[in-house]
Structures are given as C-alpha cells and as structure tokens.
Image (cartoon, grey):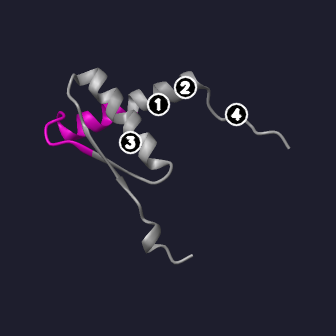
Amino acid sequence: MSAKQIMSAQEIGRVITRIAHEIVERNRGVEGLMLAGIHTRGAPLARRLADRIEQLEGHQVIVGDLDIGLYRDD
C-alpha cells in the first residue's frame, strides 16, 4: 500500500501563510498573541505558525505545548 500525498510542501507553506494572516487579522495584530499546540502534531504546527507570523509582522509570538495525555480515557 503506497501513501497518497495530499499536499505538496509548497501548498502547505501557502496554507501556513494563509492561517497566519487570519490569526493576525482576527486578533487585530500580534499584541498579546500566544499560540498553544497539543502534543504531538499541534505543537509543531503552532511553532510553524509563530515563525510565519514573526516573518510577516516582525514580532515574536510566544508558543506553548499542551500534553493532554493525562486526561485521555481511551
């Protein structure tokens, strides 16, 4: 069974940029902005978004990681 590619690296980059713009727009800037990602996939995404926002706005965004492992019941 072969893995099917859903998006290319370039497409993912465009999506990250688009989401970063939406975050800044809805927050009306970057003041007071903090991103948090859930382990294990959300945390890297939050870091990528923070990096892109810093590139776009010139302001470093605080990033936190949440480990919800202790709260799962499955």
Residue at numbered disc 2: 11
Span shown in magenta: 19-34
| Residue that protrudes farthest toward the bottom in the picture | 73
Task: Specify the amino acid type for callout 2.
Answer: Glu
Q: Is residue 53 above or below residue 38?
A: above
* Image side of residue 27 versus residue 16, left or right: left
Give the secondary structure at mark 3: helix
Query: Which quadrant of the view contains residue 23?
Result: top left
Task: Specify the amino acid type for callout 1.
Answer: Val
Mark 1 and mark 3 lie on one chain; the one further toward the N terminus is: 1
In the image, residue 66 lies at what x, y percent? 37, 57
* Residue ID at (24%, 40%): 26
Mark 4 and mark 2 lie on one chain; the one further toward the N terminus is: 4
Real-space Cα distance between discs 4 and 1?
A: 15 Å
Residue at numbered disc 3: 46
* Residue ID at (66%, 35%): 6
Give residue 62's mark: none
| Residue 63 part of the magenta segment | no
Real-space Cα distance between discs 1 and 3?
A: 13 Å
Residue at numbered disc 1: 15
* Image side of residue 11 versus residue 60, left or right: right
Real-space Cα distance between discs 2 and 3?
A: 17 Å
